[in-house]
Image (cartoon, grey):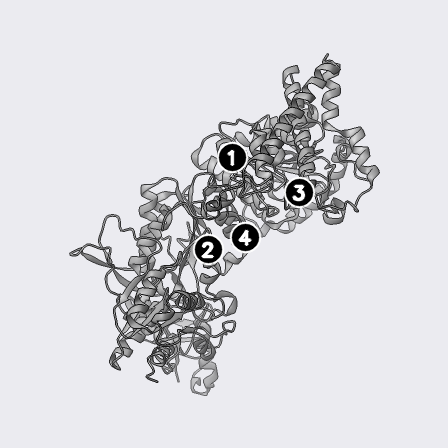
Amino acid sequence: MAIELKMPALSPTMEEGTLAKWLVKEGDSVSAGDILAEIETDKATMEFEAVDEGTIGQIVVPEGTENVKVGEVIATMAGEGDDAASKPAASQNANSDNVAGEGKDVGRGSEPATGGAKAIVASNEANAPTPAHDPEVPEGTAMVTVTVREALRDAMAEEMRADDRVFVMGEEVAQYQGAYKVTQGLLDEFGPKRVIDTPITEYGFAGIGTGAAMGGLRPIVEFMTFNFAMQAIDHIINSAAKTNYMSGGQMRCPIVFRGPNGAASRVGAQHSQNYGPWYASVPGLIVIAPYDAADAKGLLKAAIRSEDPVVFLENELVYGRSFELPDMDDFVLPIGKARIVREGGDVTIVSYSIGVGFALEAAERLGEEGIDAEVIDLRTLRPLDKETVLASLAKTNRLIVAEEGWPTCSISSEIVSICMEEGFDYLDAPVLRVTDEDVPLPYAANLEAMALIDADKIVTAAKKVCYRD
Amino acid sequence: MAKPASKRKTPAASTVQSAPKAAVKSVASNRSRAAKNEAEPDNDSALRSLQEEHQKQPRYEASDEELLRFYEQMLLIRRFEERAGQLYGLGLIGGFCHLYIGQEAVAIGLQSALDNDRDSVITGYRDHGHMLAYGIDPRIIMAELTGREAGISKGKGGSMHMFSTEHNFYGGHGIVGAQVSLGGGLALGHQYRDDGGLCLAYFGDGAANQGQVYETFNMASLWKLPIVFAIENNQYAMGTAVKRSSAETEFYRRGTAFRIPGMDVNGMDVLEVRQAAEVAFKHAREGNGPVLLELNTYRYRGHSMSDPAKYRTREEVQDQREHNDPIERAKKELVERGKTEDELKEIDKRIRATVSEAADFAENSPEPEAAELYTDVLVGKY
């Protein structure tokens, strides 16, 4: 019985990839460690190694095939000796498990859709709900389809072309082309003076970036993820956010701290946290957390131009999603303005970042049940656009907040406070929070899915405030 | 008992000390040769070269006018800080107030060697002296201490948070050690703009144990940033003596692991500090990367105004005042060069008047308008 070689996941969030090249052919004998194939994704190229000895049986997926799903059988291999049939099943599993490599998530493809976050992410990745066009774009503007990753890169490149004070620094931003490939191509265009690889030393390089901003440059400091920015939070808050005030307006700090934020996929508690509420509590900071590509580009450009320090929170799971983006020479969006991504009259769902995708999905399903939901993407967490939230509440009289993050002292809590203090007379039902569970994020797939928000939870809460449960 | 100014070793002694160390190193490098691409040869002499240059000629040859100016500037800091201490006692200055008394030669010696058109300075919270060393109006510094509208930060920064972008003085930072990496950023700016400037980043012996200091050493040396790290070793991190907090108490050697040359300087003699600055600034300005200066000094007053001073004896402080005072040293030298007691008294009188005027101004200036509470949080309108 042949061993099935399955398409490996090269990163925790990889869903599919290109089988770029086979380095073996049918009938070849291979031993453990031999390179069998090269796999490519939009982020990286990786080599696929054999973990056992054996003979390549059939190559199922030919080289050059794109969009091969993780877990799909790409070849078969006969085990050592003729008596392959006696190999226990567990060993086969071990084989495919091991080849999956870093961040492997075997079984993801065959896992029954239990309503978990993962299944929803997969469906969103393939067919992300498209929000309404931004109101700031003139009618008739042509649209192009780009990923969030490309939009962020383009925003940086355009601003770097326009202003030679702008530079980017961080771990792996230059030669490696970005740990998540957000800075891809920037080194080639702008050179090592303006695209600076740093050692793994967040506190130090956040301080250096902040000092450079105080001295008149316009740094973009990339954190590989915001989890690592915990080491640097002193400079973000004590050095960057407070300087202008402490100096009586003399000394500015125009800097952008950016990188992925929030839960990724199966990376455990220390790598899965939403820092939006942390930074949004700090006077002196601008905090932006966009969802789609247009907002990512327009707001990152605005952030780089801002005279104030900006924390720009991205989301790894959204990097690869494609959206339409207005094809304009200089597409800049206003900081501090929320956007109504879906209009509706029955209930308002306020969200930001990856939560917007879940909210749009929930809104579609609510629509099927006769509930017309309005979805607001906050986009900027500080300063918060209270007016848009309150105007929507005045229209729908029912509001819930969907946030991929903890419930306690959250953006959701803040929205609830605003509704209580300034929108009490509009309320026909209590404002509900739909958030992650109040636990460190677990590793196990089932527990992780239970801990994170998803569209189901949003649908349930929306129905509850409509008294339709 | 700490003897800051006299701890410098003779060159012969340091050569003897380094001999066994070199032997150990060569064994280590043999063992790891396979793992390294192309290890640079141990070149410890490069790390010592600036110190040796400093030892060859430790003191700056100041003209009479220069020495007189240094004396006046140090005296201004001394009198200003004495008055700040009084105002604190009267309740006119609140919160934390860290006085620079005893350390005056460091700021004056270093800052007198700067190119003020190009260079930048950053320090921690003991910052009044560094502001005065720039010749910034003592009235607006004192008014900041009393929290008045006319203060250099409109009364919103206080003793620890003063800035003057006009003078390329970037504060005034209250988190111990933060100014070191911020200074690295200022130096990156000089290099980026290729403006020929350097950053002088001051910090204390206490801050020298912070992790971010070494993160900055690494990047500054790796990228050859034009920065001079100036450790003001005043012997105590708040109440903790250097030897109780530091495994390596010779701070000028702390850059060795990052290939940053160090210099061990008597921080109680303004001319030695000035000469060390000449050597260090030249090195950094010529694109050779950072220099680490250890300025051995002594603070006569408490860490802040609320310091009970139980960690050292009165005699120790008295000993420093009597035998090592930087202002007395300069005064003695001025007299030797022909200044009369009367002339020096006249200077002291003039400085006291300046300080009194600053104190009156600071006391009588109005507090900030209530509307100032909400200004300067953000620059932009969103």
The label shown at residue B91 is 3
Q: Residue at x 69, y 37 (%)?
A: B85
Q: Residues within 10 Å of mark 2 (few under 14, many from 20)?
A: many
Single out the residue that lies furthest toward the left: A140
Q: Which residue is mark 1?
A: B164
Residue B213 against residue A427 in the figure, above or below: above
The kind of residue tagged 4 is Asp
State the image quarter where residue A307 is shown: top left
Contact? badges 2 and 3 (CB < 8 Å): no
Q: Which residue is mark 4?
A: A234
Q: Which residue is mark 2?
A: A223
Residue sitting nearer the eye, A172 or A443: A443
Q: Residues within 10 Å of mark 1 (few under 14, many from 20)?
A: some
How far apart are labels 1 and 3 at the CA level?
26 Å
State the image quarter where residue A459 is shown: bottom left
Question: Disc 3 sits on a residue from what chain?
Answer: B
Marks 1 and 3 belong to one chain: yes
Give the secondary structure at mark 3: loop
Residue sitting nearer the eye, B243 or A150: B243
Give the secondary structure at mark 2: loop
The kind of residue tagged 1 is Ser
Q: Residues within 10 Å of mark 4 (few under 14, many from 20)?
A: some
Give the secondary structure at mark 1: loop
Question: Disc 1 sits on a residue from what chain?
Answer: B
Marks 4 and 3 belong to one chain: no
The kind of residue tagged 2 is Phe
Contact? badges 2 and 1 (CB < 8 Å): no
Quarter of the rendering occupied by the N terminus of chain B? top right
